[in-house]
Amino acid sequence: MQTSWCNIAIPKPKQKNMLQFAVTTFESYKYYRCDQTLEWNAGALHYSDVVKKIHPLSFMSNSEKVAMIQNVNQVAYIGKGTYTDCAIRDGAEELLLGVQMDVEVLMVLWGHLVPWVDPVMLVQLVIRGEPGLDGEPGRPGNVGRPGDKGPPGDDGDVGEEGNAGPEGQQGHEGPPGVSGEPGEPGRPGPRGFKGDMGRPGQEGIPGIQGNPGPNGTLLLAPFPEPSVCLPQGKGREKKAKRKINNCMCARVEYVPGCGRMKSVGKNVLECKCGPIDLLFVVDSSESIGDQNFALAKQFIITVIERLSRDEKIRFDGKESNVGVVQYSHAGTEELVSMVDPNINTLLELKVAIKNLQWIAGGTFTGTALDWSKAAFRGSLSQVRVALVLTDGRSDILRDPKSLSSLCNEANVVSVGVNDIFRNEPASESLRQIACESAPTPGLSLQRDNFMELLEDAFLENVTQFICREKKCPDYSCPIHFNVSTDIALLVDSSTSVGSKNFEMGKTFVKRLAERFLGAKRAPGASVRLAVLQYSKGQAIEVPFSDNYTEVAEKIERMKFMNDATDVGSAVSYVNAYYERASQNAQRKLLLFTDGRSQGDLVNNVEEQAQAAKASKIDMYVITVGDQVHENNLRALVAGRAIDYDVDHGARHLFRVKDYPTLLKGVFYQTVTKQMSLD
């Protein structure tokens, strides 16, 4: 192809403003004829130290021409350095990228070679000819924009196995799985260690009667207790008689030395459990397990021993009777009891209980309870108690008898224990067994395992239920208040008392509260009661109140403090409470203590007792046990340890051997009667 040139006459611009010249040029351009016919594609750049595009390379139709003129008019002056080579490079690049093959190319450059010199116009039309020699490599161009995303390539070959990564964190605990089927019973475990020494044996045969002792002094005393001593010596009879003017009393003999008393012409003055017919009904089904069944038998024997020792019940088949029914599915019931002609002693009954063999069958509890009715036929007494020991899951779909079969026969206590698969007892069945909907409902208890049956607190609950219908002497000793009286009961809640004794103390306090708040009063007189407890600190559990229901509820909610003992501070605390809360009433304080107090000297206790006396507080003391601090007790009762007033102490100090003694007999009547006297 030949390269040809065509000169185009373009008048030199008269305007000094380059933008005005450009606009004028494009407004007036037209076709120029030479040896070629030209058709214009036009674009525009402007530059300084940077190159900016004014209008892209496009065919100069009327609309494009108007658009280009508008863009040129909007150009902003840059006003920096002159980089002409960069402008030529970018302009050539625009031309080369924007043209097609066999299309002529024209580039026009306006520029100032020197300041204030008219623009030099150079127009050159290059008609494509044969390719020339390769030029020098140009500068690296700018990085182009990323192209469109190509189609996915073929899957590569599987690489080699990489190294193991670090161990990850432990995941969250998953939900529990579905319970599996019960496994086969395991083999018997190894022989256990030797157990602790057993409890004392049964009471022996009474010995030969001794020779009669010397005659004692015959006195009249109000409601004597085995642990309450009467005054001795000349002149005491008259004072004792004064106490009984407002109280029905029993004639008693005084035994010198220890203060023991016994009624004249009567057996004992304490409430008595029995005669009683007691029947244990024990589940011997497969779900109980052999080892648990052995523990169940040990539990039954332990309850019998406690009732014989602590409650003095004579299980001989004549006065009181006891028996055990074991059962599994229908027809497996087996009874051993004191009425069996082959069992003559309680020891033989225990052996028979131990020899009962685990049946390991189904569970027909209703049938067993209905079958057990026969064990109460020919009952020796009116008091009947049945204790049913089971896991509570009876085969009620196949068992035709009701779980409440014994409700009209006896007082029923149901004891439910988790089975060998650790399934909890069926509480609804246990309540039905215990006659929950009956007029006189029984008791329903649950334990997590059979070992818990042998815990002391649980055994205590069971024996108390069995003996809840104790027969007590029908003594009446009403108390009377002639003037308004505010009574405070200050309960020892220190570590030396123990939580079990503390609970028994609460029961005793409720009995006192009932007596005081139910007492007769002179017209216009009132009786209020407050309950406080102390150890290292003090707390008002029941503010002064005359409402027994409210008082009893708050006493029941009292919590054991279980801390050191500070008697002096406790008396000072009560004294301050009386000053705040008691006005125009007689003040009486009953203090539970053994006299021992950490850090308290006798003179400190005396000071607090004397301060209480100065505040007209009449102080009474109940001391428990034989490990007592005598000087502190005397100081509390009489206000001084030396020169002790024996008469005053005899009326204000009550001694008991232990906490259970508080609840025996009518000791609470003795205390309340003495405190009610003016």
Image: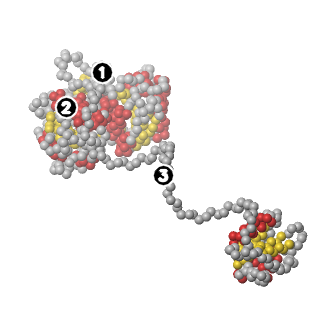
What is the three-letter code of the residue carrying label 1? Cys
Q: Which residue is mark 3?
A: 158
Label 3 secondary element: loop
* Residue at 19% across, 17% down: 210
Q: Which residue is mark 1?
A: 258
Quarter of the image holding residue 288? top left
Q: Nearer the viewer, mark 3 or mark 2?
A: 3
Tell me whether the residue at label 3 lies in contact with that at label 2, contact meaning CB atoms closer than 8 angstroms.
no
Percent of width and height locating residue 636: 43, 27
* Residue 346 visible within the image: no
> In the image, is 635 to the left or to the right of 84?
left
Residue at the left extreme of this rendering: 341
Percent of width and height locating residue 366: 18, 46
Label 2 secondary element: helix
* Residue 68 visible within the image: yes
Percent of width and height locating residue 536: 46, 32
> In the image, is 326 to the left or to the right of 457?
left
Q: Earlier in the sequence, mark 1 or mark 2?
A: 1
What is the three-letter code of the residue carrying label 3? Val
- Residue 354 image label: 2
Question: Rounded to the nearest whole Å, what is the CA distance between mark 3 and mark 2?
Answer: 74 Å
**Viewer-proximal residue, 239 or 589?**
589
**Viewer-proximal residue, 316 or 182?**
182
What is the three-letter code of the residue carrying label 2? Lys
